[in-house]
């Protein structure tokens, strides 16, 4: 089982699949948006926030795969 499947896969005209972004990337983007909306993370360098966002995304994927 792929732990991070495509978030928005689409089918192309030639019937091949364009995977788009991974579910991990989608979760990290959502987490980063939430983190940056808090006082604690406001003004923190993005590279540091992104590490925490991907940690959150990894935990979401673990929880998703252990339903």
Image (cartoon, rainbow, N blue to C red):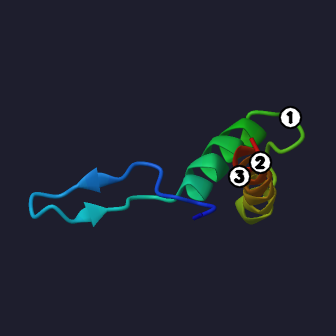
Question: What is the x, y in percent for residue 57?
Answer: 72, 52
Residue 61 disc label: 3
How crowded pointer 2 is (Cα within 10 Å; few <14, some 14-19, many 20+) is rated as: few
User: Dot 3 surroundings within 10 Å: few (below 14), some, or many (20 or more)?
Assistant: some
| 7 to the left or right of 12 | right
Q: Secondary structure at mark 3?
A: helix
3D distance between C-alphas at marks 3 and 2: 9 Å
Q: Which mark is residue 19?
A: none
Badge 3 or badge 1: first in the primary sequence: 1
- Do residues under tags 3 and 2 come within 8 Å of each other at their CB atoms? no
Label 1 close to label 2 by CB (< 8 Å): no
Label 1, residues with CA under 10 Å away: few <14, some 14-19, many ≥20: few
Q: Residue at 80% of width from left, 52% of height from top? A: 59
The residue under the point 46% across, 57% down is 6
* Residue drawn at 56 percent across, 49 percent down: 26
Q: Where does label 1 land, which residue?
A: 39
Image coordinates for residue 13, horizontal then vertical, percent: 9, 58
């Amino acid at each position: 089982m792929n732990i991070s499947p495509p978030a928005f896969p689409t089918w192309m005209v030639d019937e091949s699949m364009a995977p788009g972004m991974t579910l991990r990337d989608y979760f990290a983007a959502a987490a980063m948006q939430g983190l940056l909306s808090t006082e604690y993370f406001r003004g923190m360098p993005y590279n540091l926030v992104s590490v925490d966002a991907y940690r959150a995304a990894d935990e979401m994927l673990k929880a998703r795969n252990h339903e």
